[in-house]
Image: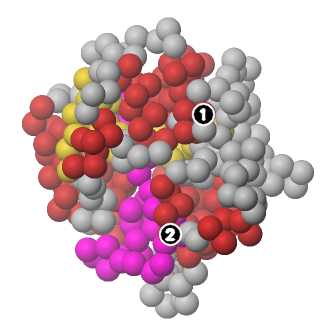
Amino acid sequence: MTSAQTPLDSPFGYRSTAKEVVDGIDLSGKTVVVTGGYSGIGTETVRALAGAGANVIVGARRPEQAHEVLDGMAGDIAILPLDLLDPASIDAFAESVAAEHETIDILINNAAIMASPLMRDARGYEAQFAANHLGHFQLTARLWPLLKAGGGARVVALSSIGHRLNGLDLDDPNWERREYEKWPAYGQAKSANALFALQLDKLGEPHGVRAFAVHPGGIATPLQRHLTMDEQRAMGWYDEEGNVNQAFKSTEEGASTTVWCAVSPLLEGMGGVYCENCNIAAPAAEDVPFGGVHPHVRDGALAEGLWSKSEELTGVSFSV
């Protein structure tokens, strides 16, 4: 049963780091998959989980860069090619993981693109929706047998406060009949991430698989690669001298909620919730513009509709 969207008495908060969250937790013998785990908060997610003893598999669109970042990092870390815009690459990655592992204990769908110009994947689908949601939908489906075999696996889907920008247009999710707008497209993709976690948790609970959506917070990372500095100044992310907004988190802090959802004992037997600042998020409120969860990503009927559309677009079904 989907858990109540009600904050807990968490010992961690806004400025907690991933290392603090995982301190004292032994992940020895656990297998973790992290997409995009070689950039921004993904790197710190891998560092924390591998440091706690997990065997971490990183899916990387740029494996050479991933090796530059991760080689020498403490822990058991493997890097495999993964391009979420290429269905064949997704299948090949899943096959490689299955060839070496019988179970997956934690899957972290971390990789993302944000506010990009109009681009399309190998199938012709809009890139933000494809990379952020559809690619991860297909990947999770391909890894589903290993997640079920884990006997208590958790799936963490990286959403964003960007979900507040707008919901879903399931009649035209790939911007084929509308004029493309990069921010509404991002909002749609991040809404899809949260709705995916909601529906996956519903379907996964009977098999011991629980899912969580995460807003990591504002962090200065390569995710902003498609934005000019003028755009980022206009949004208040940087001041005129190029200093980052003091409300932004470090990458270590930005990875904390992801890791909290992946390992926290407080979440045992729970799932289907949207989390931020190492806690279950409260409902959105006008006086907290950059936090809280908006009602459309808690809509079970919309989550089911997205699931059906995703199966249609990818040609992939979960064997639940």
Which amino acid, by three-letter code, is at mark 2?
A: His
> Measured from the top left, where is residue 151 in percent x and y?
33, 23
Principal SS element in the magenta part? loop
Which amino acid, by three-letter code, is at mark 1?
A: Glu
Judge whether 133 appears above or below 43 on screen.
Answer: below
Where residue 55 sits, quadrant-wise, is top left
* Left-right relation of 245 to 304: right
Is residue 166 visible from the viewing direction of this image?
A: no
Q: Are marks 1 and 2 in contact (CB under 8 Å)?
A: no
Judge whether 216 appears above or below 279 on screen.
Answer: below
Which of the labelled discs sits on residue 226, or is there none? 2
Q: Quadrant of the C terminus?
A: top left
> Measured from the top left, where is residue 82 in percent x and y?
24, 53
The one of 298 and 33 positioned closer to us in this rendering: 33
Q: Quadrant of the N terminus?
A: top right
Q: Which residues are magenta?
A: 105-134
Give the image's coloring scheme.
secondary structure
> Measured from the top left, where is residue 158 in percent x and y?
51, 47
